[in-house]
Image (spheres, rainbow, N blue to C red):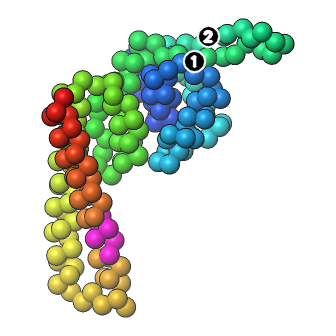
Amino acid sequence: MKEEKLMNNTQYTLLGLLAREPLSGYEMKQQINSRISHFYKINNNQLYPSLSKLEKAGFIELQAIEQESYRPPRKIYRITASGIDTLKSWVLELPEAEDSKTFLLKQYSSWLLKPNELFSLIKKKKEQHERTLEDYKKRISSFEEQNSDVNYPLFSTISVINMGINFEEASILWCDRMLQLLNQH
C-alpha cells in the first residue's frame, strides 16, 4: 500500500489507541494526554487531519452514534483489519538506535505481537544498545586519558558520554527484564 509509507508517528499512535478500543476524537485526545504525552506530544491541530488521512487510507472507519438530545451525532472511530495489519507491521520494524520516542510508541502497541515476535524485536533492540554502549566506552576511554579537569571543555564531553553510557546500561537492563518476562510466557 502506497499510503503506509506516507504515515507518521502521530497516525500510528492514533491507530495504537484505536486498536485498544473505539474512541471519539475527544476521547483520543484525553488518552494521549494521560498515557502518551510524557514521551510524545500530539497537538490538537494534528489530530483530526491525521484521522481523516487514516480514514481515506481505509485504516479506520467513522461511525456516527445518534444522541437522545438536540446534540449532533457522536463520532466514534474504530480501527479496521487493514489498520491492525499496518500497525503490527510498523511495530515490528526496529527504529534507528537514536530514535527512542518511536521505539516507545511502538512498544505501546507491542501487545498486538506474538510473544516470539516481540522477543525477537527486544533482542535486536538490546543488541543495538550494546553496540552503542561499546562505542561510548571506546570514546570515553580515549578522552579520560587526557586532561578532564572541570575547567576544561573535555570535562563536559566526558560527562555527556557518561550520561549516554548510563542511558544505554538502563536500556539494556530493561531489555533483559522484557526478555525474561517473555521467556516465561
Kindly indicate whether the residue at mark 1 contacts the one at mark 2 (C-beta within 8 angstroms).
yes
Q: Is residue 26 left or right of residue 95?
A: right
Relative to 98, residue 49 above or below: above
Q: Which mark is residue 175?
A: none
Distance of mark 2 from mark 1, alpha carbons?
6 Å
Q: Residue at x 49, y 28 (%)?
A: 17
Q: Residues within 10 Å of mark 1 (few under 14, many from 20)?
A: many
- Does any portion of residue 6 appear in the rendered image? no
- What residue did someone put label 1 on? 77
Queried whether the magenta region covers residue 147, the answer comes back as: no
Q: Secondary structure at mark 2?
A: strand
Q: Which residues are magenta?
A: 159-164
Q: Secondary structure at mark 1?
A: strand
Residue appearing at x 20%, y 34% in the figure: 182
- Quarter of the picture containing the N terminus is top left
Q: Residue at x 34, y 88 (%)?
A: 150
